Structure formats: C-alpha cells, structure tokens
Image (spheres, rainbow, N blue to C red):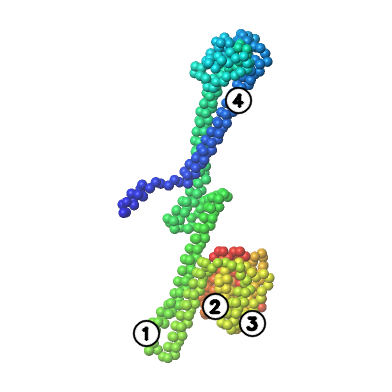
C-alpha cells in the first residue's frame, strides 16, 4: 500500500502556480475576446462589402431598365464604340449586347455565356424585362449577370459584375484578421505573464515568509511588503499577526518563568515542613501547632497563587463574548460580595453614562482585585473603600477608580505595581502573589484601555483603569 501511494504521489500532476494560472487565464480571456471581436468585425465588414456591391449592381440594372423603357433603343446603341456607352458600364461592370435571336452583337470583356432564357428575353416585345443569374462562372472569375430586354424583339443587353475580386479582398481581410488575432493573443499572454509576475511577486514573498515561520518557528521574521493595495494590506496584517504571536509567545514564556520562580518559594517551604513531619513526635506541642499552622498557611498561599495564575492565563485568552455592560452595576455586585467577605464599608459612586462594550467576567475579576488590594493595604479600615465609575471621559471611554486611605504607594513603586509578581518592600509580609494588579492591567488592555495608579491627596492610593468603547474584541 505504501509503495502504491508513493507511485501515485509521483504520478500526481503538479498544480499550476498562481502566476501561471493568472497568465493563462488572462491570455485565455483575451483570446476569447479577440476572437469574438475579430469574427464579429469580419462578418460585419464582409456583409457591408457584399451589400454595397449588390446595391451598386442593382442600381446599374435599374438605370438600364429605366433607359430602355423611356427610349426606343436598338443593340447598336449599346455597342462599345457607340457614344454614351459608359452610362451602363461603371467600374468592374461588363456589358454584352444580344440581337433579337440571342446572337452576340457586341461581346463583353470577357464574353458572357448566353442561356435559353437570355435568348427568350431578347425576343420579347416588352422593354425592361429582366432575367438574373447568380454565381456565373466566366473563366476563373465569378459574375452576377442580368439580361434586360430592349423590347419590340430588338434584342437585349447583358450586364455583369464581377464578385470574385470582392471575395478575394475579403479572404485577404480574413487572413490579416487571423494574423492580427494571433499576434494579440501572443502579446496578451506575454503581458499577462509579466503582469502576473508583478502582482504575485509580493505574494511569493509572503509565502516564503510563512514557509520560513513554519520551518524555523521563528516569529520575529520581518515581512518586506510595500504598497497600499490588497496585497500590501495583507502583508502588513501578516506582519502584525507575527508580531502579536511573538509577543504572545514571549508573554507565555515570561509567565511560565515567573510562575516557576514564585512557586519555588512556597514549595521549598512546604518541602521543609513536610520533612519535619517525620520527626513530629519528637517536637514539643507548641512547635507542632506552629508547624501545622505553617503548612495550612503555605497551602492556602499556594492555592491562591495557582488560582491567580489561572486567572491571569484566562485573562489573556478569554473566550467570553463581549456584550453591552454597565460598569456601575458590576461595581455594585463586586461591592456587595466584598462587604460580605471582608466586612468593610464600600461606597459606590457613578456618574455619566457608564455603559460600554466588554466582557463582564473579566471586568468583574479586575474590579474585585482592586477592592481586595485596597482592603489588604488599608488594614486599619478607618474610612470606607470608595469605587468611582465615571463616563464618558472621552467618547466611548469609562473610568474606574478604587480609592482607599491606606499608607499609599511609594513614588518608586507607582510605575511597577502592575508588573507580574511585583510586590513593594512593605507588602512582602502580606499575603498575596503580586498578580492581582497584573490581571487588572491585562483586562484593561484587552478592553482598549489602560491601568493607572497615583497617590491620593490626604493619604492613600487611587488605583484603577479605563475601558475604551468597542475595544473588547481583543484579549
């Protein structure tokens, strides 16, 4: 089966490239249009030439009929030596005169054949009677012949017009048309190949870049695509996509490294305490109580750290669909849960239009982290925790602030409080992992906003974020 598949794969025809497909399609369309236009043009021209020749011949015959009906004329009047004979001999018209018995009195040049019908017309008494003949062969040429009676049994005049030279002209026109069509098709194929190469050159660059990424797994490849058409837009979008993927990969790598570093400390402490459990019978009762308490505390901290890591990872790839939400309502829900959990007074103030497009789960998690952070650092609890929701500060933007009366954030820590696992020096003795505000930053960025923190006048901190309208599709 494997050998058969290999043979079939060798026999499978290679697919045409986009450049070849475009060039062939361009040439085929051009060829079809050229052939259609050429055939229609030749047909129209041939019909016009033939109709013109026929109308000229018919006019000659009508003029001759009118002449013999108005005047009594004899065969000698139409002799080639008689004056006025050129009245019925226009260009490419041959005239032959017949006597009353059908005999040729003045032969044409070339001589025309005389049929029984022609002889009968020469003997009739009525002037202007016509017998017409189509496609009469005279030598190697083809003529159209009309025999017009002179009346009174005086004979007849034969008028003939050559059509073979017209057909020769049309055949020459046909050959030239075919040559021109072939030249146009070849030129169209060459131009189509050049145009396809010009158009697909940047697509080839994009394809090479994609193949390099697939082969090397390096997302930092620069895509050298220019222009402002669809291909240029595709190149820039591909370049931005690679940049976002590289940033995402870097974020994941940094998250794993930071998480490994932070998990190492509680795990080491747990391992040390677990080793002491082997000698728990040798320890005094007070030490046993401290050991068990330490194990419980470390387990809780490890659990909290893992939960926050999960929340942070979920914040980066949340699949919750965005919807229209009211941040004031979310703040009231968060405040209600926090009051029951920590027993603190929490005040919610809202002003303006506080609705926006966002993911309610992510926004709830960010606001809860801000409230918990404020409660953790404002341990005295002398003043209520305040939540201010204001909107819009600018079109489509809502501002969320959580205010406390704690010791405040040092100026040196303000620019780093949203970094992962960062904890200020005076907060390292407090529970937590340093991920709460990092999650706030991720949620704000995912909603087109930004986090902020500053010292509050009169003591304490103001920490919050903005949410930009219509930007919740990312994340």
70 vs 299: above or below: above
Q: Upstream in the sequence, badge 3 or badge 2?
A: 3
User: CA separation, marks 1 and 4?
Assistant: 121 Å
Q: Which of 61 and 313 is in front in this view?
A: 61
In this figure, which residue is indicated by the disc labeled 3? 383
* For discs 4 and 2, the disc positioned in front in the rendered view: 4
- Helix, strand or loop under label 4: helix
Quarter of the figure that contains the N terminus: bottom left
User: CA separation, marks 1 and 2?
Assistant: 33 Å
* For discs 4 and 3, the disc positioned in front in the rendered view: 4
Q: Nearer the viewer, residue 62 or 315?
A: 62
> Residue at left 64%, top 66%?
397
In this figure, which residue is indicated by the disc labeled 4? 52
> Residue at left 49%, top 51%?
206
User: CA separation, marks 1 and 3?
Assistant: 47 Å
* For discs 1 and 4, the disc positioned in front in the rendered view: 4
């Amino acid at each position: 089966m494997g050998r058969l598949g290999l043979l079939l794969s060798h026999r499978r025809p290679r697919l045409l490239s986009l450049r070849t497909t475009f060039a062939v399609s361009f040439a085929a369309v051009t060829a079809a249009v050229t052939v259609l236009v050429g055939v229609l043009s030749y047909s129209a021209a041939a019909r016009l030439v033939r109709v013109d020749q026929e109308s000229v011949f018919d006019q000659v015959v009508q003029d001759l009929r009118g002449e013999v009906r108005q005047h009594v004329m004899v065969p000698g009047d139409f002799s080639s030596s008689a004056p006025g004979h050129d009245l019925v001999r226009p260009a490419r018209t041959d005239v032959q005169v017949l006597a009353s018995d059908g005999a040729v009195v003045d032969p044409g040049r070339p001589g025309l054949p005389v049929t029984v019908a022609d002889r009968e017309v020469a003997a009739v008494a009525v002037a202007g009677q016509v017998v017409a003949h189509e496609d009469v062969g005279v030598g190697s040429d083809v003529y159209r012949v009309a025999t017009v009676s002179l009346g009174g049994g005086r004979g007849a005049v034969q008028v003939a017009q050559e059509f073979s030279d017209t057909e020769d002209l049309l055949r020459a026109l046909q050959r030239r048309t075919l040559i021109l069509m072939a030249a146009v098709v070849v030129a169209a194929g060459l131009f189509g190949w050049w145009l396809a190469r010009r158009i697909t050159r940047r697509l080839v660059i994009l394809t090479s870049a994609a193949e390099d990424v697939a082969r090397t797994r390096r997302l930092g490849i620069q895509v050298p695509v220019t222009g402002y058409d669809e291909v240029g837009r595709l190149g820039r979008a591909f370049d931005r996509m690679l940049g976002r993927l590289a940033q995402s990969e870097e974020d994941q790598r940094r998250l794993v490294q930071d998480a490994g570093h932070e998990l190492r400390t509680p795990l080491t402490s747990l391992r040390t305490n677990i080793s002491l459990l082997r000698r728990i019978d040798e320890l005094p009762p007070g030490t046993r109580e401290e050991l068990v308490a330490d194990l419980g505390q470390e387990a809780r901290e490890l659990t909290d750290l893992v939960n926050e890591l999960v929340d942070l990872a979920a914040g980066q790839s949340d699949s919750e669909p965005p919807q229209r939400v009211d941040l004031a309502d979310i703040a009231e829900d968060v405040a209600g849960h926090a009051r029951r959990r920590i027993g603190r007074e929490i005040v919610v103030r809202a002003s303006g239009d506080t609705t926006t497009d966002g993911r309610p789960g992510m926004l709830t998690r960010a606001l809860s982290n801000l409230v918990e952070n404020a409660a953790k650092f404002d341990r005295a609890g002398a003043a209520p925790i305040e939540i201010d929701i204001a909107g819009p500060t600018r079109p489509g933007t809502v501002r969320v602030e959580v205010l406390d009366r704690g010791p405040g954030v040092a100026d040196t820590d303000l620019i780093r409080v949203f970094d992962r696992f960062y904890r200020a020096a005076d907060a390292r003795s407090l529970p937590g992992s340093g991920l709460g505000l990092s999650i706030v930053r991720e949620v704000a960025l995912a909603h087109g906003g930004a986090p902020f923190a500053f010292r509050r006048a009169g003591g304490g901190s103001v920490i919050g974020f903005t949410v930009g309208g219509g930007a919740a599709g990312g994340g």
